[in-house]
Image (cartoon, rainbow, N blue to C red):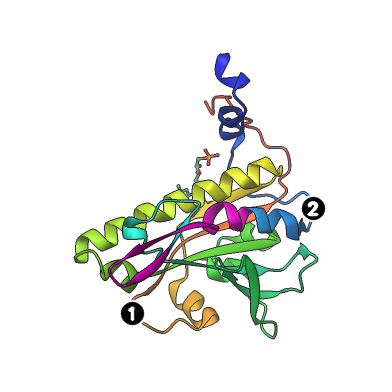
Amino acid sequence: MRWMENELLALMARRRTNRTAAVPTITARQLSDCLFAGMGITGETSNCVGALPLGMTPSGGARNPYEAYVVALGVDGLEPGVYHYSAADHDLGRISANHLPKISDLVGGQDWADAMPCLVLLCARLDRTMWKYDDANAYRVVLIEAGHIGQNMMLAATRHGLSACPTAALSHTAIKRLLGLDRLTDAPIYALTLSTPEPGPHPAGQSIN
Ligand SMILES: Cc1cc2nc3c(=O)[nH]c(=O)nc-3n(C[C@H](O)[C@H](O)[C@H](O)COP(=O)(O)O)c2cc1C
């Protein structure tokens, strides 16, 4: 098949959701690349009030509503803890090391998630996008952007031989408490676990039925 000769298409075709962890850790480099793929800053533009970052994914009005947080339980080279990702600095800042949450408690009780070395949480600051768009439009724009970010992270994970399992089943109250988000306009939207998967039954291009 001709598409398999295209490196990018072949990578896209290899992406698969796999909820297993063959080993208990991923590397800091793998995590770093996934975060940069989804959230990295690569340029700058401006509007009537000042400079705005341009990133690896498109953002309505360049308002960049997402903040990424990492629950790192098994990342080689990184102390276990809860971190905030600074896209501007491409760096992680630890929020908390005292309380390491059970990942399943953050993703609606999904037990498989407790074997995962790492969870990336995408939380929207809705007010950033609401500055430019009216209510319903702002909501739509913000949700669309989660898909862009998540897909880039999944592809970077795939490139590293990881699986990034997306989940929209989020325990909003637990996440907001963990991250210290207390405003109505702070909204956990999407999350991805990262792991080196056990070989799955449905490799790329293979039908599920
Ligand atoms: C928006 C969204 C939400 C999802 N939520 C969950 C989830 O809560 N739990 C889960 O195990 N998988 C979740 N998934 C993963 C899907 O189950 C998975 O993508 C689907 O089975 C297709 O498999 P594939 O990703 O390997 O193509 C979600 C996927 C998307 C796109």
Q: Residue furthest top?
A: 1
x and y percent of residue 80 in the render? 74, 73
Residue drawn 67% across the image and 37% down it: 200
Q: Is residue 161 left or right of residue 128?
A: right
| Cα separation between marks 2 and 1 | 38 Å
Q: Nearer the viewer, mark 2 or mark 1?
A: 1
Residue drawn 28% across the image and 62% down it: 139
> Which residue type carries mark 2?
Val
Q: Which residue is mark 1?
A: 184
Instruction: Classify 93 as above or below 40.
Output: below
Is residue 135 among what the camera can see?
A: yes
Is residue 18 among what the camera can see?
A: no
Q: Is residue 27 left or right of residue 150?
A: right
Q: Which residue is mark 2?
A: 23
Splitting the image into 4 quarters, where does residue 103 fall? bottom right
> Which residue type carries mark 1?
Leu
Q: Nearer the viewer, residue 197 or 90?
A: 90
Q: Secondary structure at mark 1?
A: loop
Splitting the image into 4 quarters, where does residue 92 fall? bottom right
x and y percent of residue 59 in the render? 38, 56
Is residue 120 in the magenta section?
A: no
Classed neighbour count for the residue bearing mark 2: other residues with Cα under 10 Å, few (<14), some (14–19), many (≥20): some
Instruction: Classify 158 as above or below 153.
Output: above
Instruction: Classify 4 as above or below 101.
Output: above
Is residue 40 in the magenta section?
A: yes
x and y percent of residue 150 in the render? 50, 52
Looking at the rendering, the stretch of residues picked out in magenta corresponds to 34-52
Q: Nearer the viewer, residue 191 or 48?
A: 48
x and y percent of residue 72 in the render? 68, 68
